[in-house]
Amino acid sequence: MNKDSKIFVAGHRGLVGSAILKNLKAKGYTNFVLRTHAELDLTDQQAVHDFFAAEKPEYVFLAAAHVGGIVANSRYRADFIYENLMIQNNVIHASYLNNVKKLLFLGSTCIYPGNAPQPMPEDCLLTSPLEYTNEPYAIAKIAGIKMCESYNLQYGTNYIAVMPTNLYGPNDNFNLETSHVLPAMIRKIHLGKCLNEGDWDAVRKDMNLRPVEGVSGLNTDEEILAVLKKYGISGQEVTLWGTGKPLREFLWSEEMADASVYIMEHVDFKDTYTPGSKDIRNCHINIGTGKEITIAQLADKIVKEVGYQGKLTFDATKPDGTMRKLTDVSKLHSLGWQHKIDIEEGVHRMYQWYLSKG
């Protein structure tokens, strides 16, 4: 990419997209074409094709997606498969029709099979059944990965798919119903601390910024306590889902962005598979740290960072999901990129960012 190349970052206000845009600007790129969801609905095929035909972007970062945690994936299964398939199909095909030079598609390591070998290499995709809880999302994302591979092989395009591990960072989703595990834990433990200390001003401020099931800081104490109790938050105790035993890997979103930009700058499709391979598949690239931590250990780090003095418990009647998911990042390392921010520093940065937005 040249510094003045025309770049479309789809999903530029989300967790990953905003970090990619920030990283590109820091590296001196200047020519961006950006659209909010209100300005361009990526599930609308005609709107997407009209946009590409008019703007003719040279490079595309496909960071837009319908995402959420285990609860949302289980509850809104149709939304997850439909919206992600539509976004991917429209953007990838429009990129081909309008001669985009290079595209980066974001998958997710959560779409590997539930009993995949640990750590998970790229070639374990589709080797055994998917996890039931996020099966619709996984099928959609796998379709996106296979679209990139198939367009490259049939049309000679240069579309690269990456598989980020669990991400967290600035502009994350803190909605208690739909967020991923780490931001949900930070918010729950923060609210537990506020209630434990009787700091109702902080509770109301938080609820005004991010209402829960329509309940905001303008509601009564009783109404606020009732809705927070549904999510395991009270003045005496914070309850988290599952046993706390699953092992997870977490990557700071701004490092994911750095890896994404690095790959766009230095890696082509031909670099993602062994030359002379009879079957060219699983050309995607895992992006992670290669390090893991139990949910209970993560919760302990958040408790210490937040300064919560109440009781923390786990509800073992709720699902844990897969007990271990760790990426094999040897392919990424061989291509020249490694992470720098470990979980302790990341949790500190995340909570400070959360407070700065409150």
Image (cartoon, rainbow, N blue to C red):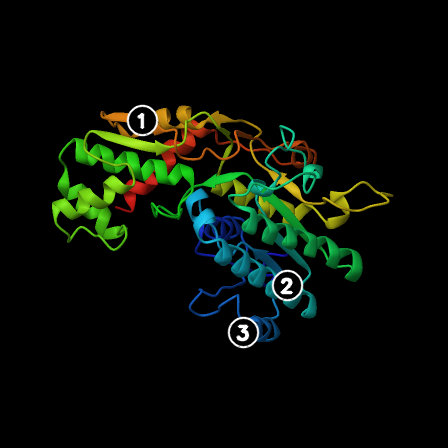
**The residue under label 2 is which amino acid type?**
Glu
Q: Which mark is residue 313?
A: 1
Q: Please, is residue 309 above or below residue 219 in the view?
A: above
| Residue marked by disc 3 | 47
Residue 85 in view: yes
Instruction: Answer with mark 3 or mark 2, whichever residue precedes in sequence.
Output: 3
Q: Secondary structure at mark 2?
A: loop
x, y percentage for residue 125? 67, 41
**The residue under label 1 is which amino acid type?**
Thr
Q: Which residue: 27% across, 42% down?
A: 230
Q: Which residue: 64% across, 63% down?
A: 58
Q: Would you say the residues marked 3 and 2 are in contact, meaning their CB atoms lie under 8 Å apart?
A: no
Mark in the foreground, 3 or 2: 3
| Residue marked by disc 2 | 58
Mark in the foreground, 1 or 2: 1
Q: Label 3 vs label 2: CA separation?
A: 18 Å
Q: Label 1 vs label 2: CA separation?
A: 50 Å
Instruction: Answer with mark 1 or mark 2, whichever residue precedes in sequence.
Output: 2
